[in-house]
Amino acid sequence: LAKTTQPISMDSYEGQEVNITCSHNNIATNDYITWYQQFPSQGPRFIIQGYKTKVTNEVASLFIPADRKSSTLSLPRVSLSDTAVYYCLVGVVNTGNQFYFGTGTSLTVIP
Amino acid sequence: NAGVTQTPKFRILKIGQSMTLQCAQDMNHNYMYWYRQDPGMGLKLIYYSVGAGITDKGEVPNGYNVSRSTTEDFPLRLELAAPSQTSVYFCASSYLSGPRELFFGSGTQLSVL
C-alpha cells in the first residue's frame, strides 16, 4: 500500500484558495487517489477521487501530475466552515479493502 | 435512510470490563469497517468485512473481535478493556470496495479508566 505524506497543518484566510499537497512516491499503477474531509466529532466524508490529470466537482478540484507521485487538493474561496482535517488516501478502487488514513492536514480558516 | 448508525455515542468502561459497540447500516452495503481514532491522530483500521460471514484483520486488531452475521450489522467486541483502548471508534460501510464510497457513522467515544 502506498504511503502518503501531507503537511500537518495549514492556515488560510476566508475567501482564499487553499491547496493541500499529498506525496505518494510509491503509488502503484492501479491506485486511485481519494480525499476525505473530517469535522470535529464527526466521521470523515468523501470529497473527491481521481486517477490522473484533473478532476473537479462542486466542492473541490484534484490535480494529479503525469508521474502521479503527488496530488493537490484545491479548495476554492474557503469559508470558516471549511475548517477541518483533510486526508489523502491512495489505494486500488475495485480490489482490496485495506486502505489507510494517515494523520491528515488540519486546515484552519481565519476570518 | 439513516445511513450508518452507531451506538452508544459515549461509554466509560472500567479496566477488564467487556462491551460491544454496535454498528448498523441500511444501505445494503457489502463492505463494512471499524476504525479507531486517537486524539489528534488519523484513523486506524481495526477490522473489516466484505460480506456476511467474512471478516478480516486490519492494522490494529489486537484486543478486538468482530462478527458479521447479517449484511446490516457489524458489531465490534472488546473483551478485556484496557486504557490503551480509550479512543473514538468509527464504523463505515461502502457499496464498492476501495476508498471511494466510504460512509461513516457519527462515532462512539470510549474511555477506559
Image (tube, coloured by chain):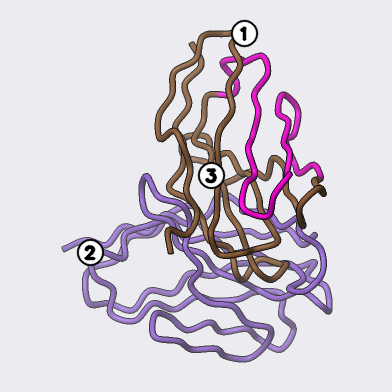
Chain colours: A purple, B brown
According to the image, label 2 marks what residue?
A80
> Label 3: how many residues lie within 10 Å, few (<14), some (14-19) or many (20+)?
many
Closer to viewer: mark 2 or mark 3: 3
Position of residue B88 in the picture relative to residue A31 (left or right): left
Pointers 2 and 3 in contact (C-beta within 8 Å): no
Rendered image: mark on residue A88: none
**Residue A22, image x, y percentages:** 59, 67
Decide which of B10, A9 is in the foreground and name it.
Answer: B10
- Chain containing mark 1: B
Numbered circle sitting on residue B90: 3
Q: In the image, is residue A21 part of the stretch drawn in magenta?
A: no
In this picture, residue A95 sits left or right of residue A60: right
Which residue is rendered at x = 62% and y = 82% of the image?
A: A50
Circle 1 is placed at which residue position?
A: B16
User: B76 or A88: which is nearer to us?
Assistant: B76
Chain identifier of the residue bearing label 2 in the image: A
Q: Amino acid at mark 1?
A: Gly
- Per the model, the C-alpha gap separating discs 2 and 1 is 43 Å
